[in-house]
Amino acid sequence: MPSRRHFIRRSAALLGLAAAVPWLARGAFATPSQLLQRAIPASGELLPVIGLGTSRTFNVSLDDASLDPLDEVMRTFINGGGKLIDTAPSYGNAEAVSGELLRRTGTQDKAFLASKVSASGRERGMAQVAASLRALQTERLDLLQVHNLQDTRTQLGLLRELKEQGKVRYIGITHYRESAHDDLLAVLAKEPVDFVQLNYSVGERNAEQRLLPYCADRGIATLINRPFQRGQLFDRVRDTPLPDWAIEVDATSWAQLLLKFILAHPAVTVVIPATSKARYMADNLLAGHGRLPDAALRERIARAFG
């Protein structure tokens, strides 16, 4: 993606980069404390608005050759002020890789760990949670979510038990398709949860109609997946120069414009782009710095990707 590579040149002055990836990985990210944070409505706890997704990108072998590039991603994320890491048992080795990277980097205490249950039946759900705790090398999860509404009632009952026992701090539900938004709303009308994870982007805006307003009104935190639609949105602007008006929201890449479009919605708590490259992780983090677009500029961003 030329536009993302171009970020390294255009934002060098801002970051003070001499050698982008190694320098960032050692922890010299510019002013991580300035990364925007938003409150979890259920508690008031603040979370940095840029999280880290692990689907596909963290499903690698647990050998040094596979882990070393992701080690740089994790260091860049944590040193840049990031906190929430979203993973799942269904993401292959992603949980084990996340746990090992946090151990290797000595940053377990800085992470907000979010995982999922994607099982049918209480016993299978219990077994899956136990396996997730082992893989992530932790005794407690910050957030546990029912993945894609699988056996929702049973698993939410289990999650509430785990929350009462102190093994889970927050609970939630997830999906990644617009066609499931009505199903998410139906569950929310019956089951109290702390978080909802959903797909929302400049190319998938259905959540603006009912789901995001519902979460805002009911005090439910939101995690946003598929912000780049698995890279498809970048194809729409491939070889297209970043417009001059991007500077109005302090954006230096197309990725930052996409993330700032999402973050400008007041119901969004954290967006969780996935990446396997430290330079893209740094780029994503910059979306949580500086100004966010107003309604008119959001529509201008949408037209640029139309």
Image: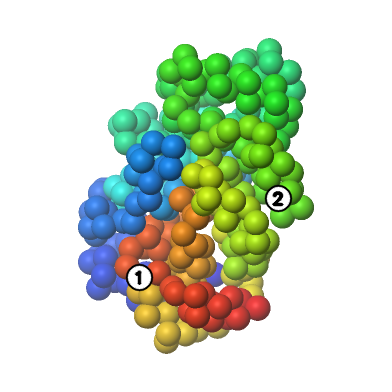
* Residue shown at the point (32%, 68%) measured from the top left: 290
Q: Can you name the residue that lies furthest to the bottom here? A: 244
Residue 253: image location, x then y, percent: 44, 72
Q: Which residue matches tag 1?
A: 291
Q: Secondary structure at mark 2?
A: helix
Q: Quadrant of residue 209?
A: bottom right
**Residue on which disc 2 sits:** 181
Residue, x 55% and y 16% (percent of image)?
161
Residue beneath the point at 33% across and 56% down: 36
Assess disc 1: are there few (<14), some (14-19) or many (≥20) residues with their C-alpha within 10 Å of its C-alpha: some
The disc at residue 170 is none
In percent of width and height, residue 102 lies at: 38, 33
Image quarter for residue 105? top left
Q: Which class describes the residues within 10 Å of circle 2: few (<14), some (14-19), or many (20+)?
A: many
- In the rendered image, residue 238, in percent from the top left (x then y), is placed at 59, 77
**Side (left or right) of 20 relative to 180:** left
Position of the N terminus, as image quadrant, is bottom right
Q: Position of residue 254 (x, y in %)?
A: 49, 72
Q: Evaluate whether residue 188 shows in this view.
A: yes
Q: Looking at the picture, does residue 290 appear above or below residue 89? A: below
The residue shown at (24%, 53%) is: 33
Side (left or right) of 119 relative to 78: right
Q: Quadrant of the C terminus?
A: bottom right
Q: Quadrant of residue 124?
A: top right
Q: Is residue 15 above or below residue 186?
A: below
Q: Earlier in the sequence, mark 2 or mark 1?
A: 2
Q: CA distance from mark 2 to mark 1?
A: 29 Å
